[in-house]
Amino acid sequence: MSIPSLKTVSTFLFLVSVTLLFQGCKVSYSFTGADIGNSQTFQVNNFVNNAAIVEPRIAREFTLDLQDILLNQTSLSIVTNSGDLVYEGEIVQYYVSPITATSNSTAAQNRLTIAINVRFFNTLDPEKDFEERFSFYFDYGGVDQLIGSQLDDALEVIFERITQDIFNKSLANW
């Protein structure tokens, strides 16, 4: 039987020390920079569409997209009630406006803007609660119709940005 080298023993002790250090930490961080503290669960209540123009499916899609980002970027479990972290709110704006014009006074480019009012409650640390409005936009050609795959693309871009902004505001301590 051979005696392990000093380098092997040092490496082993270093790895054991690092493992114990990470297990002893009380604050939970994910690789995305999220500070979930002692939270174990979250809930996303259904967002409602209170905008003047109602696109029927966007409230449900946004709710699911917000759930997905929280599931994918944290170790939190989703619950339907009594979550440690609670997200709720409403879509308050959905509108299309021209942003550039042609020489014939028609829109050369349009912009879809969506704004969402979000209320966040951290039941374990109420000082982190907030209510804030998040918005983003998608530009498209003036002759294009915002239907079908064009609308799908617009919603994907807008919701990706808004959900990431909500995630950062509620869980990232940068």
Image (cartoon, helix red, strand yellow):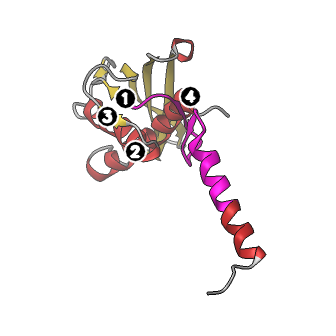
| Label 2 – label 1 distance at C-alpha | 27 Å
Quadrant where the C terminus is found in the figure: top right
**Mark 1 belongs to which amino acid?**
Phe
Q: Are marks 3 and 1 in contact (CB under 8 Å)?
A: yes
Dots 2, 4 in contact, CB < 8 A: no
The amino acid beneath tag 3 is: Ile
Q: Mark 2 points at which residue?
A: 154
Q: Which residue is drawn at 55% across and 17% down?
A: 128
On screen, residue 6 versus residue 1, left or right, reads right
Residue 149 location (% of width, % of height): 30, 52
Could you say whether the residue bearing mark 3 is in a helix, strand or loop?
A: strand
Task: Give the residue at mark 3.
Answer: 78
Residue beneath disc 1: 42
Whichever of labels 2 and 1 marks the residue nearer the N terminus, that label is 1
Mark toward the viewer: 2 or 1: 1
Q: Label 2: how many residues lie within 10 Å, few (<14), some (14-19) or many (20+)?
A: many
Q: Earlier in the sequence, mark 2 or mark 3?
A: 3
User: What is the number of the mark on residue 169?
Assistant: 4
Q: Give the range drawn in magenta.
A: 14-42
Residue at 56 percent of width and 49 percent of height:
31
- Mark 2 or 3, closer to the camera: 3
Q: Mark 2 or mark 4, which is nearer to you?
A: 4
Is residue 87 visible from the viewing direction of this image?
yes
Question: Disc 4 or 3, which lies upstream in sequence?
Answer: 3
